[in-house]
Amino acid sequence: MIVKPRKIPDIVLEIDAILNRLAFFHPKRPWLEEDRKSYLTGYRGELQVDYHLELIDNDNMLIFADLRLIHQNQAFQMDTLIICPYFILIIESKNIAGTLTFEKDSTQMIRELDGKKQGFKNPLVQVARQKEQLMGWLKKRKIPLIPVEDLVGIADRRTVIITSDNNRAIFKKIIHVDILNEKIKQFEATHTQNPLSKKQLHKLKNLLLREHTPAPPSILKKQNIGESEIIIGIQCPICKQFSLRRQIQSWYCSKCQSYSKNGHIQAVYDYFLIKNTTISNKECREFLKLECPNLAKKLLVRMKLPISGSNKNRLYHRPPNL
């Protein structure tokens, strides 16, 4: 059963929002577009895992996509987390073409494609670290500890995996996703003792959903883009210029003379994606180029955003469905 479905990664939405508000000839555009392509490739690999999991008929299997938790002040995100009564499985997805070489005790994975070699983080090390963090997270919350398994799922069936003879044990941990269901059946046959009860599974499910913590925006800092380089204002959905101005109960575009009733909504969402997961009345006015505090308050309240604080300290939070 899919508990937390997969969606387009937040970081792709963040890049899209930034690209939409950068000057067309901005020097960082090519870097952002390349990053976007890379993240979407990874996303397509994760969808391959989802496809195979959907073929499993097991209501006791709880599936979480892109779950991000905090343990000991450190965030860790799992591409796919599966909770079963008898075991837990973490899957790190990789959608990488070519030949992948894993050297024993190395923190690197080497990809060879078209005669060129490139180093990547070793996904076996990544998923082992996620396992360690998840076990610590569970222990701190006094969740009965059942076996935790970890796998690396290679999405492209044409990808060749190579290692030395003394390192072949890795093939118990790294698989092509085509055989994922068979691997899960092996875990089911191996782990048959001391299951979590239905009540414990329900409690763990709700706890994981409640403690999921989306990553804050990070691209501006990563790409060294100044906040002043981001175009502010409300974009016209017709001509795409940032030229909407409030006129009675609607937004009027001074460029193409069109009207928009809800043009401000995407602008507020852009703020959440680009700048911060919360927005104040003042920040809303600055980003949307509004003058009236009462208008900003009315617009934010009508969006039915989660709220914290009161009066001048009130903050409006990014909605869970964004």
Image (cartoon, rainbow, N blue to C red):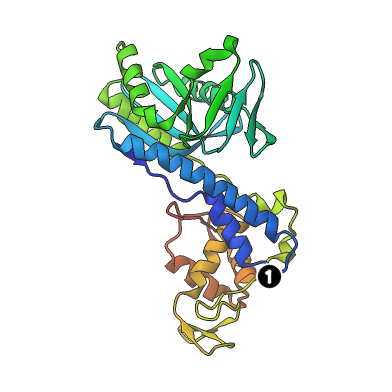
Identified at 59% across, 52% down, the residue is 36
Where disc 1 sits, the SS reads loop
Instruction: Name above or below for residue 34 compared with residue 99.
Output: below
Q: Is residue 80 visible?
A: yes
Identified at 34% across, 12% down, the residue is 190
Locate residue 26: give its quadrant: bottom right
Q: Is 163 on the left-hand or right-hand side of 8?
A: right
Q: Amino acid at mark 1?
A: Phe
Instruction: Name above or below for residue 203 compared with residue 262.
Output: above
Image coordinates for residue 263, horizontal then vertical, percent: 49, 75
Image coordinates for residue 70, horizontal then vertical, percent: 55, 33
Q: Is residue 209 visible?
A: no
Q: Is 8 on the left-hand or right-hand side of 118?
A: left
Locate residue 209: give its quadrant: top left
Q: Residues within 10 Å of mark 1 (few under 14, many from 20)?
A: few
Q: Quadrant of the N terminus?
A: top left
Name the foreground residue: 18 vs 213. 18
Identified at 57% across, 44% down, the residue is 215
Residue holding disc 1? 24
Name the foreground residue: 12 vs 97. 97
Locate residue 148: give its quadrant: top left
